[in-house]
Amino acid sequence: MSASRDACRVNGQPADLVGINDRGLRYGDGVFETLAVVNHEPQLWTRHLERLETGCRRLGLPAPPRDHWHADVAALSLPRFATLRLTATRGEGGRGYAPPAAPQITTITQSGAMPDRPREWWHSGVAVRFCETRLAVQPALAGIKHLNRLEQVLARGEWTDPVVAEGLMESMDGRVMEATSSNLLIDRGDRLCAPATNDCGVEGIMQGWLLDRAATLGAVVERTPIRREDLWQAKGVMLVNSLIGLWPVHSLAGHPLPRSPWVNRLQDEIVQTGAALMPAVVEP
Amino acid sequence: MSASRDACRVNGQPADLVGINDRGLRYGDGVFETLAVVNHEPQLWTRHLERLETGCRRLGLPAPPRDHWHADVAALSLPRFATLRLTATRGEGGRGYAPPAAPQITTITQSGAMPDRPREWWHSGVAVRFCETRLAVQPALAGIKHLNRLEQVLARGEWTDPVVAEGLMESMDGRVMEATSSNLLIDRGDRLCAPATNDCGVEGIMQGWLLDRAATLGAVVERTPIRREDLWQAKGVMLVNSLIGLWPVHSLAGHPLPRSPWVNRLQDEIVQTGAALMPAVVEP
């Protein structure tokens, strides 16, 4: 995890440090994106920048111009396969929590190694648990990818068994929202669903792209509240994110789940476009 | 706000930078304390360390030994009057959100200037508003002072009028919890109350100390859910924190509030012990 200076830039310059008064560190006052790099190119780039800009707008941060991120990415000379993280914080300044009137945004652009996961997680699927840690209901922060991620840290700290790939998180009022670092797609037979994120959770980029692809392929897609019973009655449950693409869930809390016919179709979409770091993309 | 290296230490050494992979920056994965320095000494020191250690335990962080903080404070040669911030993060490492099994905690100790507020805020009191931004209900994070403070940033960003000293924040379910950077004491005539923080909000150090002092002086003290109508019916409302000590609230959302007889008694307690940066302490 320690940063190699040639793989990261701070405010457009090679660097791997930030000031201790940066509001990103002091308050988690900022947003970030994690992208897959495939064939030297960040994937779903425009969608990620759009969510980052939405997050900036929601937090009242001036979003860095897209040219800034383009220049950073060009300067990094991205490897063929990698991860890329973009971070924007409100920088230094302000009296306590009060945001400064004209913030000097801190930007961080860094590439890193690919996640190393068993091949069978893409093929036969993953075992998933429910987390005890719940997601607070907070419309002011819902949907965006901000730097206040203690709920995810606590939830991911609930298990160390390497056989369990992910943990599902419910909202404080009992809706199934997402996994600690991936989003849900639920095949309900007549429609492909994702949990609504209007008051809780993160709106997933890969999730949104796959819903759009599925719609193009003829699916009825819907963002709607999801409850545990919806998972047990589903034709299949899938975990998706920008790095791993799509994993089918073969078991949930020890109970087997069926495999949706959408698994192969959506994985094919990802592989054909090289949109994520799936084994068939990385080692074709 | 920019850090002067002789007023801050990172991991026990003079420094004002942290790595971009520090989990404090990546996820807000850590805790902090803000203390008053009076006559070169941090005030309510043991109470602040206890809350920090409670926060570490709740987040599953090994708390830095107290000797570490003592050594940092000794090395800083604190000015006669100042603020002091202690921060502990989970350091670098871990795969994504997963906390590392043996984290290398990052500690930051920094002193800063006193807050500069009008003298009359202590004497005649402050004007306070209600914030639109609400505090999410999250028992897993309630009570402790963690680094996920976007709710406070958003709430404090709701106004710029310098006449308004603070904004009150309600929980998502309508209880009055605290102000953006201070805590509440409510004089209900027969008892002195503070909002319960079991599922939301921060347990204030000055607040707890003043409740203990008031109990010693004969008050019945209570932590209990507080609603807006409780404020309107109160004999007086006070804002307290470790830096400012105690401000009486003279008006709330434009409506005058009575002044509690506890204002002078509790301010006297603070001044006699030099527990906060009140004008009578700083310019006696």
Image (cartoon, coloured by chain):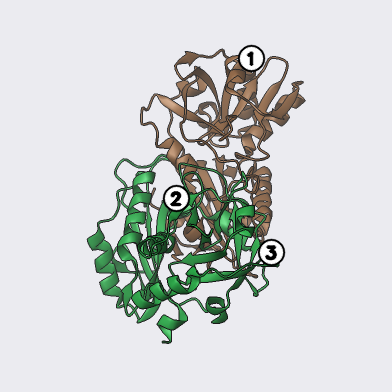
Chain colours: A brown, B green
Q: Give the alpha-carbon distance from disc 3 to disc 1, as whole Å.
A: 57 Å
- Marks 3/2 in contact by CB < 8 Å: the verdict is no
Q: Amino acid at mark 2?
A: Gly
* N-term-proximal mark, 3 vs 2: 2
Residue at 59% in and 46% down = A145
From the viewer's perspective, tell me whether residue A98 is left or right of residue A162: right
Q: Is residue B29 or residue A86 the one in the foreground?
A: B29
Q: Which mark is residue A139?
A: none
Q: Is residue B35 left or right of residue A102?
A: left
Q: Are marks 3 and 1 in contact (CB under 8 Å)?
A: no
Residue B37, above or below A227: below
Mark 1 residue type: Pro
Position of A183 with respect to A19 (left or right) is: right
The type of residue carrying mark 3 is: Ala
The chain holding disc 1 is A
| Residue A184 pos. (x, y %) | 59, 28
Q: Which mark is residue B253?
A: 3
Q: Residue at x 39, y 77 (%)?
A: B271
Q: Which residue is mark 2?
A: B143
The residue that label 1 is drawn on is A261
Q: Residues within 10 Å of mark 1 (few under 14, many from 20)?
A: few
Specify the subunit that label 3 lies on: B
In this rendering, position of residue B203 left or right of residue B178: left
Same chain shared by disc 2 and disc 1? no
Q: Is residue A150 visible?
A: yes
Q: Chain of mark 2?
A: B
Viewer-side residue, B24 vs A260: B24
Regarding mark 1 in the picture, which secondary structure is present there? loop
Question: At which x and y percent is residue A213?
Answer: 71, 28
| SS category of the residue bearing label 3 | loop
Confirm whether residue A94 shows in the render: no
Instruction: Give how far apart the Cα atoms at labels 2 and 1 are.
Output: 46 Å
